[in-house]
Structures are given as structure tokens and as C-alpha cells.
Image (cartoon, helix red, strand yellow):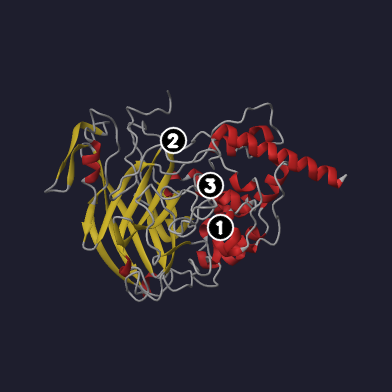
Amino acid sequence: MRIKQNIARIGIAAALLGTIAFSFGAQPTGASSHREAPLISQDPLADNTDLYAFRSPDKPDTVTIVANYIPLEEPNGGPNFATFGNDVRYEVNIDNDGDAKPDVTYRWTFYSKIINPESFLYITFPVNFDAVAKKYQNLNVQQFYKLERITGSGGNDDEKKRVEVLGMNLPVAPNNVGPRSTPDYNTLANAAVMTLGNTTAFAGPRDDPFFVDLGSIFDLGGLRPFNSFHLLQLQLPNEPGIDGVSGYNTHSLIIQVPISKLTKDHKDPLDTAFPNLGIYASASRQQVRVLRNNGTVHNTGRWVQVSRLGNPLINEVIIPLGDKDYWNSQSPNEDYKFEKYYLKPELAGIVNTIYPALPDARTTGRTDLSLILLTGIPGVNFTGNTKADLLRLNVAIAPSAPVGQGNPFTVITTDPNAAPDLAGFPNGRRLEDDVTDIEIRAVIDGYGFKLNSLFGLPNNSPNNIVGDGVNANDKPFAQVFPYVAAPHAGYDSSLHR
């Protein structure tokens, strides 16, 4: 009986490979933290959606970090368009000594001004930018921010750290409303690119650069290219994936910083003895919120972390529901408490059940996932033995391609003749990296030819080509800072067409 089952499984797998090759030209086919935990799903302004960190291809002596907030933001969200939270503390934290505690932090805090409170309009006439006053004209609701750089070895204790204000009253780019309100939007957005000494900064709405088939994946683990092989296939045809994030915007905090400002010894990438950085983004709120009878809100008390993000997809599919909010509140150096979920990933067992044609993935003893996601890969981006969810970037590894043109499957490539692209995820994360397919294949033991030969990691076939069928963002990325594509305009929104 066992022999017959194995023969049947091999036959189904062969048919599966043939179907995929015929339908999609043998091309390998990303959700991140969009509404990933119960409490933060009710607080979108503080919800980390994605974090990216990479050496800037056009300025390789710098690192670009993109921290996105506000998931699934509709472009046509008037009259009160999305903004950063004026009562939220946004931070990007960098560990440069391997203890999973921040040594360098960039902090954003915001405030808003209503120019004419007697009007309901967000924009009163076509918007333009006053370069002298550094303000947008005809924009009735304007938002500004303070950017601080915080350094020191005090962990999360601000009293033991040095605080440097990089900029005050910096303008946030307006929302892209439409051709009448925000003509020549790229020029308006570029006016919000701030040069602050050796740091370049941008804050404002952008196209959400993440790409994933949300609709199918969260329908009991469906992958459209594999519809006919799902346990509940329901006669659904195999078809390309649909990008569930296409057409949506997000709010981006983007900085470009010299690498020497981030490394422990303050040296450049080829000279530093500490090239591996651990990065995470977070959002915090004050502990007490008072709703007043006059319609205003008063916040007080200590700051409490309500959201964080290092590697993509961790809180979505690794951390179970009962621990998601707790995980969001914890510092990365406490992540040893969650290692059990990496070692025994629920997703592997689910895929084994709902795709019986695929070779079974290991469901226990997954030290490979713990190593890659909690400590980094020795010889690539290993930051130390402290177990922590950090986006790890080895700044000594040079960019391999212009922005948007790297191999989206990085080290898990299906081409045996292609060199592994170590400039992308899990070594940092570029905008084009297909993190959903990469992590799915890792979890189900489809690591690909290169990791099989380099590290002996499993390369089960056809697990090594499994994916959601969405391989790229819906808009091309820019080749210069801030790199992330301009936001979709409300007037042109395709979400309801």
C-alpha cells in the first residue's frame, strides 16, 4: 500500500510540474504585516505593514530603509484622507553589536495644521509648494514632523541615550487626490524629500510596494496556480495570481543614511569589522487615552510599543493568534520566547494537508527557520546567538542590480545556472524581493538548488516552485530616492472599477 501511495504521489507531482510549466512557462511564481494581529488591526495608523533595508544601488555608501504604515489604504479616501498619527511615535531601530537592542534609532513624531477650519475641504485649489516657507499652498490639512537620531547603549532607556534633532517642521507629502487637486504629483512629492546633513528623508503616501494574492491565500491557503491540487479544489482552474495589494497606497517613512553612521565602528562597508546590522521598525502609543466631552483626545503616560516588524510574514503565519498582540508588544531581544513556533511551524503542517500531491515538509525540528530568521546565516548576515526577529543586512555585500531589477527570488532561485542573489532577502530586503514565495518555499522544504548545494537544505520538487503567482509590484519602482513608486491617485483609482 505504501509503495502504491508513493507511486501515486510521484505521478501527481509530475503532472503538477507539467501543468505549471505548460500554463506559466516554467516561471516561478509576497502577505506581509497587513492587519496581522487582533489589536493592531483596529489601529491602522500605528500598524507596520512592511520594512525594507538595502544598500542604495545609486549611492552604495548608503543604506536606504523604508518603513511603511497604514495597510490597504484606499486612494479615494476623502474628505479625510489618511495621515500619520499625531499621537504615534514611529521608529526605525538598528542593532549593530548583536545584542538585539537598538544602538541607533530614527524617530518620527507628527503634528497637523488645519489652515481653514471653517472649510470641509482637504484641498482648496490646485496644490503647489512654497520652497522658501517649505509649505504646501492650498493644502488645507498640512502635516509636519520632527526627525530625531538617538544613539547609545541604553537599550530602550532614552535617559541613557544621546538625542540629536535632524529636522523640525518638515513637510509630509500630500495625498495624491487627482489631476485638479494635485497636478504634477511627482513634483509635489519630491518637494518633501529633505536633505538633513548627511541624511535624506521622506515622509508621505506612496504606492504599497508589497505584492501578494491576499484573496486566495487567506481562502484556506489557496494558491491559484495550484488550484486543481488543493484538497478543496472545487473544480477551480489553475490560473495566475491576483495582486490583492494592487491599487492600494501606504504611508512611508524613508531614510537614506551613510553606512558609517550605522556600523558599530563608524566605518564604511569595506572597512568595518561589524558589517551585519539588525533592523526593526516599531510604533508606540502613550499608555492612557482620555476621550473628552468636547470631541478632543488627551494622551498621557509612558510610551508603549503596539506594533513592530523585522522580517516579513512572521506575525502573520508564524506567531499564533493567542500570542500575536503579545509579540507586537515585545522587544526583539525577548524573541527566544517565541522560537518554539519557528521550530514547529503550523504552516508546514497545513500545506502537507491541503496539498497532498506535494512531498511532505518537516513539521518539527526546524532549526533552519530559527537560524535564518532569528540569528541570521553564518557567513552571510549572522548577527549573533541572540534569538531575535530582525531584518538582517550585511552592508559589505554590494548591490547586485539597480532598484527593481534584482532577482526577486534571491537565493531560492529555480535556475540552477543562476548565481544566488545575496543582495536581497533574507539579507535585508529590497522592494522587488518576492518574500511570500521565498518564505513559503523555505517553510515547505523547497529551498532551491543553491541553498541545497551550499548548506544542504532540502530542495524537494515541486515544492521549490510553489508560489502565489504574483511575482512583481503593480507599479515600477524609481531609480532614485525615495525609490518607492508614487501613490495611486484617488481620481484614477481602479479599486472600484
Residue at (23, 45) in percent of width and height = 190
The quarter of the picture where the N terminus appears is top right
Inter-mark Cα distance, 2 to 1: 31 Å
The extreme front residue here reads 417
Q: The residue under label 1 is which amino acid type?
A: Lys
Q: Please, what secondary structure does the residue beneath circle 1 have?
A: helix
Figure quadrant of residue 157: bottom left
Q: Is residue 416 above or below residue 184?
A: below
Q: Outermost residue, left direction?
A: 132
Q: Measured from the top left, where is residue 50 in percent x and y?
A: 44, 50
In the displayed structure, does residue 218 sit left or right of residue 46?
Answer: right
Residue 414 seen in render: yes
Give 409 or 326, whichever is nearer the viewer: 409
Q: Amino acid at mark 3?
A: Thr
Crowd rating for badge 3 (residues with CA inside 10 Å; few <14, some 14–19, many 20+): many
Disc number placed over residue 450 in the picture, else none? 1
Helix, strand or loop at mark 3: helix
Question: Which residue sits at x=46%, y=45%?
Answer: 43
Question: Which residue is labeled 2 in the image?
Answer: 246
- Distance of label 3 from label 1 (alpha carbons): 19 Å
Confirm or deny contact between disc 3 and disc 2 (CB under 8 A): no
User: Number of marks in the image?
Assistant: 3
Which label number is shown at residue 107? none
Residue extending farthest to the top is 497
Q: Using the image as rendered, state which of residue 96 and residue 402 is in the foreground.
A: 402
Residue at image mark 3: 436
* Residue 224 in view here: no
Disc 2, SS: loop
